[in-house]
Image (cartoon, rainbow, N blue to C red):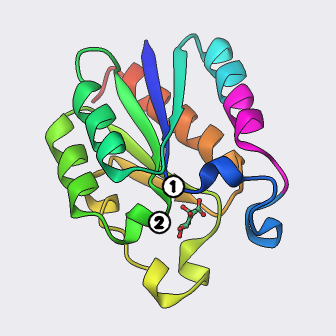
Amino acid sequence: MQILVLHGPNLSLLGRREPGIYGSCTLPEIDRQLQALGRELGCDVTCRQSDVEGELVGWIGQAPGIFAGIVINPAAYTHTSVALRDAVAAAGIPVVEVHLSNTHAREAFRHQSYTAAVCLGQIQGFGPQSYLLGLRALHGFLSSTER
Ligand code: DQA
């Protein structure tokens, strides 16, 4: 089983970006943890990051037929992007949205997600663990015979 993990804008700065909110873990460290968990679960994890909305849209569009599902942190595009929402809705494969921080405990403009309603589910507020929980949830869903 192949799983795609997508990181949105500014997430390449993790480790030095607002550490009081996002912690000290870097993106390569998160990717290593995801790949280790993937090995444990028996799935192949491919991680990509982009600051460019269209590139993320393109990767989501190309995923069906290659990847069984997607874990995505759309970052700031969560709160702005109809294009990402439409890409997720069109993909037809399960997508789990994750956030490091609890966006509901932050500024009002972060309370709305354009993408959440077209995702299988959303996990947020657990730091890097949000990604690992998201991968576990997606893998569990894809492995379930009851879906
Ligand atoms: C974020 C939350 C977003 O509001 C913010 O724009 C980010 C990161 C998170 O993981 O907590 O860039 O998606």
> Could you say where residue 82 lies in the image, as x and y percent from the top left?
22, 63
> Could you say where residue 1 lies in the image, as x and y percent from the top left?
43, 12
Residue 102 sits above or below residue 13 on the image: below
Q: Residues within 10 Å of mark 2 (few under 14, many from 20)?
A: some
Residue 9 sits above or below residue 82 on the image: above
Residue name at image x 21 percent, y 56 percent: 83
**Closer-to-camera residue (115/27):** 27
**Would the CB of label 1 be found within 8 Å of ligand 1?**
yes
Name the residue beneath numbered marker 1.
9
| Horizontal side of residue 132 vs 54, given as left or right | right
Task: Please check the rendered image and state whether residue 29 is part of the magenta-colored stretch, yes or no.
Answer: yes
> Could you say where residue 9 lies in the image, as x and y percent from the top left?
51, 55
- The extreme bottom residue here reads 108
The kind of secondary structure the magenta stretch mainly shows is helix
**Would the CB of label 2 be found within 8 Å of ligand 1?**
yes
Residue name at image x 34 percent, y 60 percent: 116
Which residues make up the magenta segment? Answer: 24-33
Question: In which quadrant of the rendered image does the C terminus lie?
Answer: top left
* Quarter of image, ligand 1: bottom right
The CA distance from mark 1 to mark 2 is 7 Å
Q: Amino acid at mark 2?
A: Ala
Task: Please check the rendered image and state whether residue 98 is part of the magenta-colored stretch, yes or no.
Answer: no
Name the residue beneath numbered marker 2.
76
Q: Quadrant of residue 27?
A: top right
C-beta proximity under 8 Å, tags 1 and 2: yes
